[in-house]
Image: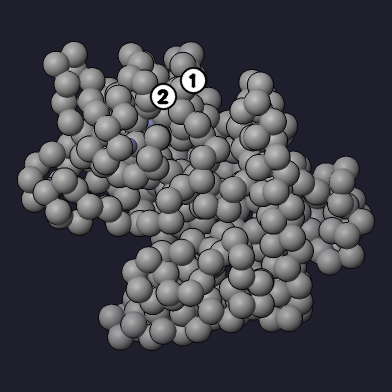
Amino acid sequence: MELRARRFPPTVASQVDCSSKAKPIRTYTCLCGATTFFDNTRCLTCGREQGFCPKCRTLSALLPQPDFSYRCGTCDAPVGKCWNYSANSVCNRCVSPPTEGALCDCCRFNATIPDLSVSGNAAKWYRLEAAKRRLFYDLDLLGLPYGTSSDGIDPPLAFDFKADYIPVDDFWRPTGDEEQVYTGHANGRITINVREADDVEREKLRVDMGEAHRTLIGHFRHEIGHYYWDMLVKDRREDEFKALFGDHENPAYNDAMNAYYQSGPAYDWPSRCVSAYASMHPWEDFAETWARYLAMISALDTARHAGFETETDSTRDSIDTLVARYQRLGIALNEINRSMGLIDVVPDVFVPAVVEKLRYIDGLVREARENNQVFRSVAALG
Ligand SMILES: [Zn+2]
Ligand SMILES: [Zn+2]
Ligand SMILES: [Zn+2]
Ligand SMILES: [Zn+2]
């Protein structure tokens, strides 16, 4: 059975403004008054179809029109379902104006999708897309730039969702020359092995590797960290980076990786890194810290709108305030989870060295947001 991922048909870029700032809400309201959620495609109370509108950035009821398109139930914009919503049921976003075959502002970055003739891959793809939509929510919340070459963005962002070529009997056993898919990033291309979307296998690996968390959204947040290193640090702020994270050129990445898998993490990683894996190489340290930064922003944003953290504004508050509130929130959430017999929601301990790395990343994010606003207003002027 062929497990190699196939190329996705040529994409049709949607007409939506992918850089608009997301509305900072995680729950929404249907026209009938019922609460709806980020991943909904239908209101469970009144049965109306739901879709994320690119114009008002809100999950809205979709009002059917005689020509089989829709109007947004929130802002009345003409909208159509993303092709991956209407044809593949892995998305709940819309495009505006309605365009046959168009992909939404999340799906348009897919370069490779899983082979859907393989049993189980459609469900795994659905989970991957759901995690990816949350990643884009984080990036929009922070006002970070991303895009393709035609958007004028370097490096151009793309996703490959691939499976190992040869089925393996044992979990994650190497399958031969270049036949195993490694989750990773290279020049804007983020590859995720679709096995990561199998809950049982991912949990086995988490336990095997001694990780506090292993989640799909965590993979996306980590890999996009490498993407932003290339965009915001490489050839720009490498000296500052070295001073905090270490020399990324010495030892070379491959040597550091081999040493890590032979000898394990640095003994002193808890005093300077957010995870054992972060101690492998400065690039991994950056990606791990970046992922924690996004997780912190996302958790505080959600908590704020759920009524826990009414004052936090991730785009205005200082990093020290954000860290303090996140740690306080984490203690409460962890205790709730422990009372339910679940693993900690916020396992991270931000030691002073890690806070300084978060401060560096926070500075990068704020500068990138300002530059992105200028970039977008210049682009809007044509
Ligand atoms: Zn409803
Ligand atoms: Zn709308
Ligand atoms: Zn889509
Ligand atoms: Zn990495």
Q: Is residue 25 left or right of residue 238?
A: left
Distance of mark 1 from mark 2, alpha carbons?
Answer: 6 Å
Q: Amino acid at mark 2?
A: Leu
> x%, y% of residue 268?
76, 79
| Tag 1 residue | 13
Instruction: Work out whether 236 lies above or below 106.
Output: below
Quarter of the N terminus within the rendering? top left
Under tag 1, what secondary structure?
A: loop
The residue at the point 42 percent across, 69 percent down is: 304
Quarter of the C terminus within the rendering? top right
Disc 2 residue lies near ligand 3 with CB under 8 A: yes
Residue 380 visible in this rendered orientation of the protein: yes
The residue at the point 69 percent across, 81 percent down is: 351
> x%, y% of residue 359?
73, 68
| Tag 2 residue | 103
The numbered mark, 1 or 2, whose residue comes first in the sequence reads 1
Quadrant of ligand 2 in image: top left
Residue placed most toward the observer, 298 or 162 = 298
> x%, y% of residue 331?
46, 84
